[in-house]
Amino acid sequence: MSNKFILFSFIFIFSISLNDGIALITKSKGTIEYKKNDGTIIKDNLKKGTSLFNNDRIVTGSNGFAKYVYLDDGSIIKVHKDAEVYIYGAIDKRSIIKQINVSSGNVKFEVSKQGKDDFTVVTPTSVATVKGTDFWLESDEDDGDQFFGLSGLVNVQNVESNVILQLTRNTTILSQPDGSIDIKKTDVEDFKKLQKLELNAGEIDEVQYETSILEQIGEDLPEGEIKIQLDDGSGSLKEILIKYK
């Protein structure tokens, strides 16, 4: 069989998969409500292999967990307990323009390198644009958002103040409804809480949990820079660059 035929077969299969949805459920457990874009509601029976479509919604309960993967690039989204997410995606040739709206809860993102379009995460307080990175989001409509960087870069914009900060490894951005937004080194206790979610969901075991905590405790804040964009009132943005060690 020629390489050309193999490539053609892959593209054909990929096109069919996209017609069946934009993502697939790969794991679920506990209390989950899944609302399809046609209004159909499925409770506590979100099976592995279920196709997800544009404008679907997933709500997890206090013991709920759902993981899904995008069909074009393998980006993984983990929806942990007490979360509500809306899944949006538009097909552009053989790639998916991805957006997730997170109303509340804890969500882990493992985003593959994107093409010309960013992966967008929207909450009531913030908008994050991602080219390809791993990070956590803890969102609350009243208290705002906490973004926890694991790798790569994420630009986080507060929708009230329009200030943009850059999330990097081992840093936390706090974005609040009143327009304030700050960055700091990730607290070990916060990291433990997030890793405990992964442990309870069966995504890591006890050894991996303990190892990750030890690595976090022994890691200093890396050198980097923070970019802050401010609206000068006339619609133009001014950029402030802060370098840190």
Image (spheres, rainbow, N blue to C red):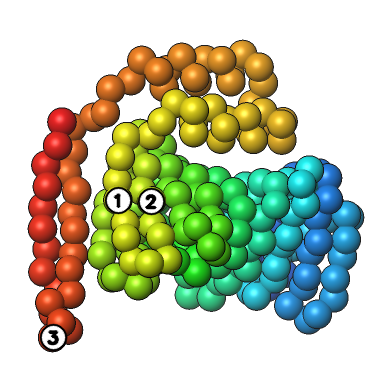
Which is more N-terminal, label 1 or label 3? 1
The residue closer to the viewer here, 176 or 116, is 176
x and y, in percent, of residue 209 in the image: 58, 20
Q: Residue drawn at (56%, 71%), measured in percent from left and top?
A: 89
Which is more N-terminal, label 2 or label 3? 2
Left/right placement of residue 43 relative to residue 197 reads right
Tag 3 secondary structure: loop
Residue 149's disc is none
Q: Amino acid at mark 3?
A: Ser
Tell me the distance, in whole angstroms, between the alpha carbons under discs 2 and 1. Answer: 5 Å
Left/right placement of residue 39 relative to residue 96 reads right
Q: How many marks?
A: 3
Tag 2 secondary structure: strand
Q: Amino acid at mark 1?
A: Asp
Left/right placement of residue 192 relative to residue 33 reads left
Per the image, the residue denoted by label 2 is 174
Q: Residue drawn at (41%, 22%), measured in percent from left and top?
A: 216
Residue 135 in the image: above or below residue 105: above
Q: Amino acid at mark 2?
A: Leu
Quadrant for the C terminus, please. top left
